[in-house]
Amino acid sequence: MQVTVLGASGRTGFHVVRLLIARGHTVRAGLRSRKRAEVFRDVKADPVVADVTADPEDLVEAFKNSEVVINAIGAPDPEPESVNLVDRDGAITAMRAAEKAGVARFIQLSAQFADSPDQGDRLVRSILLAKQVSDSVLQRSALTWTIVRPGTLTDGPATGRVKAAGHLEPGRIARQDVAAVLVGALAEPLTENRGFDVVSGDFPVGSALATLD
């Protein structure tokens, strides 16, 4: 299937792109500007400008013919103004554009405690509040949705093993493992119209998603 990845040059998005290609999908790598296309010189992905803070009609064009959009964007800093522009308003703009473009499914990279920001770390409260809003809008959209709420992200190596459930105790997880969950959700019906937490654990990604409770 054709999948457009938003935030494709980011630390998590790039892993998502590589995994999708490895599994035989056609990938459009959504970037804020053409300057970042260099990252994909040796990767079989089609770089496309998909800036969620720019003209919504450009996003509609970027999503054209895609069956799925995976949103891995994130604000460059935790200041509320930046976070609201990207993680809240930008994500919502992407959802609306996906609906208009006829995309069937939207998979959103959120954050643990985005569904209850008051219980999360105060240092990232602005991010959690922004994602809470965009996650809520996604759930009310016409799209088949999945919201993945990972614990604290790390840049360590992939373990291939996670724990996933509706709600979990605070935890950590490698970005590569998060990417595997985002991609794995494509093949697991239990993840459709569902939001869940994911942290490092003892179960292979496929098994963890197939036994969501």
Image (spheres, rainbow, N blue to C red):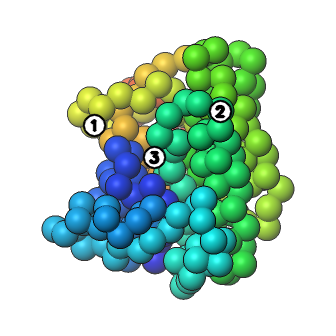
Most extreme residue toward the left is 42
- Which mark, residue 120? none
> CA separation, marks 3 and 2?
28 Å
Residue at 27% over, 37% down: 158
* Local SS, label 1: loop
Residue at 41% over, 74% down: 48
Q: Is residue 141 left or right of residue 52?
A: right
- Which mark, residue 158? 1
Q: Percent position (x, y) of residue 78?
A: 55, 30
> CA separation, marks 1 and 2?
31 Å
Sequence-earlier tag: 1 or 2: 2
Q: Percent position (x, y) of residue 87?
A: 62, 45
What residue is disc 3 on? 181
What residue is disc 2 on? 80
Most extreme residue toward the right is 140
Q: Percent position (x, y) of residue 40?
A: 25, 66
